[in-house]
Image (tube, rainbow, N blue to C red):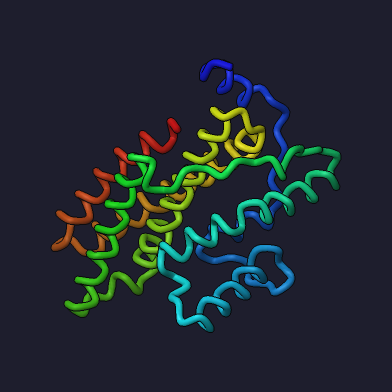
Amino acid sequence: MAKKERKNKIKNKEEFQMPEWMECAWRRVPCDRDDCKICGKIKRERARHIAAGENPDDMSVALEDVGNDFKEMLSMIKADAAAHGFDIENIDDIQEPPEPNDFPFYNQAAEWSADIHKMAEQAYDNLDAWPELEPGLDLLWYSNTILAKIYRQLCNRWHIEQGDEYGEEDYKYTKYVLGECLAILKKSLGELITMYPEQKGKFNLSLIMLSGIEEQAMKI
């Protein structure tokens, strides 16, 4: 199937609405309920990483969890879909996607995210407060989240190219998440530019670079 035909198939296919608990997989402020399919699992995984002497907030650890949870998450989505009369087939046949660093665009986004966190480290060294303010917290959180979601969407596109139906099921939702994350990041940087005019240059540069990432991310 040609790439254009695959895109049309995604666009025209009857859309399954992702369950609301999926929002907790990426929002900075989730519901935090123990019975939530996402929040409860995240709490258990954080405890497991801490017990193993690992940093649960490290991006490599987070990406490992994404890979480990790949089929488990889809199984939960399939169960929710079945309850609403949808049928997502062939979960067991899903192929493992390439590693993050195999995608050039992921590496580009990773550099931007790393620069954001370097800025935060410098701010801590200089006793600047912005990383602890709401715009700063959003900037740091969603600079990681968007990296994971860019990888997710690149994997979705890869699955679609391989003929796996899974990619089609998740493609639209991940595009929505990317749009939300990008909007929050742009808002955060805009607020920081206003709040810290003496640091306008570096925040503005990050915003310009983010615009380039946005253009590519929404075209995956």
Q: How many numbered marks does the figure carry?
A: 0
Percent of width and height locating residue 53? 46, 82
Tell me: 79 left or right of 110.
Answer: right
Tell me: 43 left or right of 154.
Answer: right
Identify the residue at image location x=18%, y=56%: 202
Percent of width and height locating residue 86? 81, 38
Identify the residue at image location x=48%, y=44%: 178
Residue 211 vs residue 146, the one in the foreground? 146
Q: Quadrant of the N terminus?
A: top right
Above or below: residue 8 compared with residue 125? above
Residue 49 vs residue 29, the one in the foreground? 49
Percent of width and height locating residue 156? 54, 38
Percent of width and height locating residue 96? 56, 45
Q: Quadrant of residue 208?
A: top left
Q: Quadrant of residue 87?
A: top right
Tell me: 108 left or right of 82.
Answer: left
Above or below: residue 3 compared with residue 121? above
Residue 123 vs residue 49, the one in the foreground? 49
Q: Quadrant of the C terminus?
A: top left
Residue 202 vs residue 66, the one in the foreground? 66
Identify the residue at image location x=55%, y=75%: 46
Identify the residue at image location x=47%, y=72%: 56
Q: Quadrant of residue 65?
A: bottom right
